[in-house]
């Protein structure tokens, strides 16, 4: 039986706008096993990104409990969370979010600067991460010299440079053409299968969701569907979910 | 140090803006250092042979005469090594353009050489000058400027004094701590040509015997002539030279005021640059924090960037000042402030203040954007992505 990496109990996230309280996640409970590949789907405003941010420890819940590995993320201080994130979570954004003035190498090296690794060890780690994403020959290129797909691969290398157990991705193919999106999904599948990364991915794209082993559908902050896919059936299931969401 | 490449590259991500900001720090800092040097020169304590020199002039202004007969009464006060007549001749050499302007004084050659005994005659001799009533002693700076040689005739057309002086260069001097852009001739030449001038002089330059005399004589001299038709104002050489600068008004207050305003303006410009830089990078900073960068690290990186910008501008400004100082001093030497300018030098304390101003600007310009960037929530920052 697989060990759960993420355990979420009765998670509530509320925002206050003026006097109005907006409940984005309402008593949500979820468990994600180590090595799983989960797609979070749902209409806009359903709380997908908020859930992702809470899992990654970049936002704080109003109430409830989030446990990632041994760390109770929901109770950690901001400084402790930052330290935890640097070693345990890799974040992949829709718009890649590479630092434009840094080369691919320097971008991937950024999270490693927070570790105690010396320059030689960092170099080795960066080269490894870039070779995994197939961009070892582009390490001296700046983001503006790369295509969107390549930029996203550098972002994936950056997210995995510190070898975190958990990768969270927010619409990683949302800004890419079909071919580049496909390449990114193949890469994520590889990270999951070959490097045993647990991946939680927010997506609107049924095709992207079909790569996941599990589809979680949120609506108005509540878990609506939670399906474990079988290879080959995933596309149809994701499409069905997507259709029900719109 | 690990983050230095990021900080450095971030500084120049908008090259034009960063270079303009550097310029806006560099040039004002150059001016601040220049003003600092002027203030420091005004404040410098008298030193060398000059600390024993005293100047006696009319209390009202330099354009008023005092009787030459005061000499005997002043000498009775004791403590005087030597004193010489020192009269501004003015006049015209070639034309009235600034390039042909230099100090021209009628003096008593033998006595002057004793009053200014630190000045060296590098060509010709004191005797040649003393023995030639129409002889002149010129400074090395003028020799360099006009290519003058010993024995050469120099004609000064009088304006204050209606007489044209045809002078022969008999000696060339080099005053290590004074202006070398000056011409001295025997005042007796003018007195002979204009008998009505005889007995009336501009100033006396006195070489006192010791510090006690320097402290005592100004008060005694001025008291002695207080109730006469020509009351005097007696000052040390430094006070006298500073007086030319002070003619512009309360120069120290003015320079301090302008310098403070300049520093404030640089601060605003640098702060604006840093605020823009931080605002443009809200999402990038959020990404860095997502990667695990602590708030304190973000704060240090933005402050470091601001500090680096200000230090680069500051150091370039100080370098420009060090390079341009010689030219500025040379230009000032050819004005009535030449005596004051001769005492100017690059003071390490002025450079240190300039450096300190750079650090101050760097820290204060960066602190608000840095704190703002570090405090913004990550999710707010990421929402700016799109």
Image (tube, grey):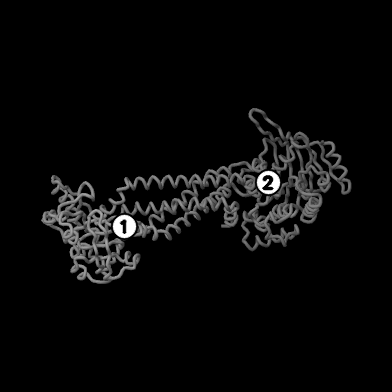
Looking at the rendered image, the disc whose residue lies closer to the viewer, 2 or 1, is 1
Residue B268: x %, y % from top left: 49, 44
Residue A136: x %, y % from top left: 72, 61
Chain identifier of the residue bearing label 2 in the image: A
User: Quick one: B94 or A34, which is closer to the camera?
Assistant: B94
Label 1 secondary element: helix
Q: Quadrant of residue A170?
A: top right
Asked if one can make out residue A162 in the rendered structure from this viewpoint, the answer is no
| Left or right of B208, for residue A144 | right
| Left or right of A221, for residue B248 | left
Q: Residue at x 47, y 51 (%)?
A: B359
Q: Quadrant of the C terminus of chain B?
A: top right
Q: Quadrant of the N terminus of chain B?
A: bottom right
Q: What's the distance in space between the residues labelled 2 and 1, CA to CA? A: 76 Å
Q: Residue at x 35, y 45 (%)?
A: B253
The 10 Å Cα crowd at callout 1, few under 14, some 14 to 19, many 20 or more, is many
User: Quick one: B316 or B362, which is closer to the camera?
Assistant: B316
User: Quick one: B261 or A239, which is closer to the camera?
Assistant: B261
| Left or right of B140, for residue B214 | left
Asked if one can make out residue A34 in the rendered structure from this viewpoint, the answer is yes
Residue B175: x %, y % from top left: 28, 64
- Residue topped by disc 1: B338
Label 2 secondary element: strand
Q: Residue at x 71, y 43 (%)?
A: A55
| Callouts 2 and 1 close, C-beta under 8 Å | no
Q: Quadrant of residue A145?
A: bottom right
Chain identifier of the residue bearing label 1 in the image: B
| Left or right of B141, for residue B128 | left
- Residue topped by disc 2: A71
């Amino acid at each position: 039986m697989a060990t759960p990496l993420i355990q979420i109990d009765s998670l509530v996230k509320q925002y206050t706008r003026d006097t109005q309280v907006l409940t984005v996640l309402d008593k949500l409970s979820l468990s994600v096993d180590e090595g799983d590949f989960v797609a979070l789907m749902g209409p806009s405003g359903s709380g997908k990104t908020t859930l992702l941010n809470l899992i990654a420890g970049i936002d704080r819940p109003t109430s409830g409990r989030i446990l990632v590995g041994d760390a109770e993320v929901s109770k950690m201080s901001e400084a402790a969370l930052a330290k935890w994130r640097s070693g345990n979570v890799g974040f992949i954004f829709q718009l890649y979010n590479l630092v434009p003035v840094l080369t691919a190498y320097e971008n991937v090296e950024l999270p490693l600067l927070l570790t105690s690794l010396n320059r030689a060890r960092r170099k080795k780690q960066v080269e490894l991460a870039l070779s995994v994403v197939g961009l070892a020959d582009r390490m001296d290129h700046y983001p503006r010299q790369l295509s969107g797909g390549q930029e996203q691969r550098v972002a994936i290398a950056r997210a995995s440079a510190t070898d975190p157990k958990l990768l969270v991705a927010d619409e990683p193919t949302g800004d890419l053409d079909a071919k580049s999106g496909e390449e990114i999904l193949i890469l994520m599948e590889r990270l999951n299968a070959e490097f045993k990364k647990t991946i939680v991915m927010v997506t609107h794209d049924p095709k992207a969701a079909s790569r996941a082993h599990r589809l979680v559908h949120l609506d108005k902050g509540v878990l609506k569907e939670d399906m474990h896919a079988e290879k080959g059936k995933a596309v149809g299931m994701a499409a069905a979910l997507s259709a029900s969401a719109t | 140090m690990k983050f230095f490449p990021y900080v450095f590259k971030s500084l120049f991500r908008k090259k034009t803006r960063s270079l303009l900001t550097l310029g806006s720090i560099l040039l004002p800092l150059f001016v601040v250092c220049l003003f600092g040097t002027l203030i420091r020169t005004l404040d410098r304590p008298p030193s060398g042979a000059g600390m024993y020199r005293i100047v006696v002039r009319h209390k009202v202004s330099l354009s008023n005469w005092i009787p030459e007969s005061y000499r005997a009464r002043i000498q009775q006060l004791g403590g005087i090594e030597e004193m010489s007549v020192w009269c501004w001749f003015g006049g015209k050499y070639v034309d009235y353009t600034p390039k042909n302007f230099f100090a021209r004084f009628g003096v008593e050659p033998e006595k002057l050489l004793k009053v200014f005994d630190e000045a060296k005659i590098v060509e010709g001799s004191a005797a040649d000058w003393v023995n030639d009533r129409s002889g002149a002693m010129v400074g090395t700076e003028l020799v360099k400027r006009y290519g003058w040689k010993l024995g050469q005739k120099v004609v000064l057309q009088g304006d204050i004094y209606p007489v044209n002086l045809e002078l022969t260069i008999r000696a060339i001097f080099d005053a290590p701590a004074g202006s070398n852009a000056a011409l001295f001739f025997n005042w007796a030449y003018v007195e002979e040509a204009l008998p009505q001038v005889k007995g009336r002089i501009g100033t006396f330059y006195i070489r006192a015997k010791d510090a006690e005399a320097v402290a005592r004589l100004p008060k005694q001299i001025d008291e002695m002539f207080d109730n006469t038709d020509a009351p005097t104002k007696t000052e040390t050489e430094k006070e006298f030279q500073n007086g030319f600068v002070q003619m512009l008004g309360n120069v120290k207050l003015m320079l301090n005021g302008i310098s403070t305003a300049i520093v404030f303006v640089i601060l605003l410009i640098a702060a604006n640059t840093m605020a823009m830089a931080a605002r443009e990078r809200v999402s990038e900073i959020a990404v860095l924090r997502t990667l695990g960068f602590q708030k304190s690290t973000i704060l240090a990186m933005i402050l470091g960037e601001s500090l680096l910008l200000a230090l680069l501008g500051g150091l370039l400004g100080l370098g420009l000042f060090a390079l341009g100082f010689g030219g500025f001093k040379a230009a000032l030497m050819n004005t009535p402030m030449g005596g004051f300018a001769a005492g100017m030098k690059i003071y390490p304390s002025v450079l240190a203040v300039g450096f300190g101003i750079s650090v101050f600007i760097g820290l204060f310009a960066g602190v608000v954007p840095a704190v703002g960037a570090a405090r913004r929530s990550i999710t707010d920052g990421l929402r700016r992505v799109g």
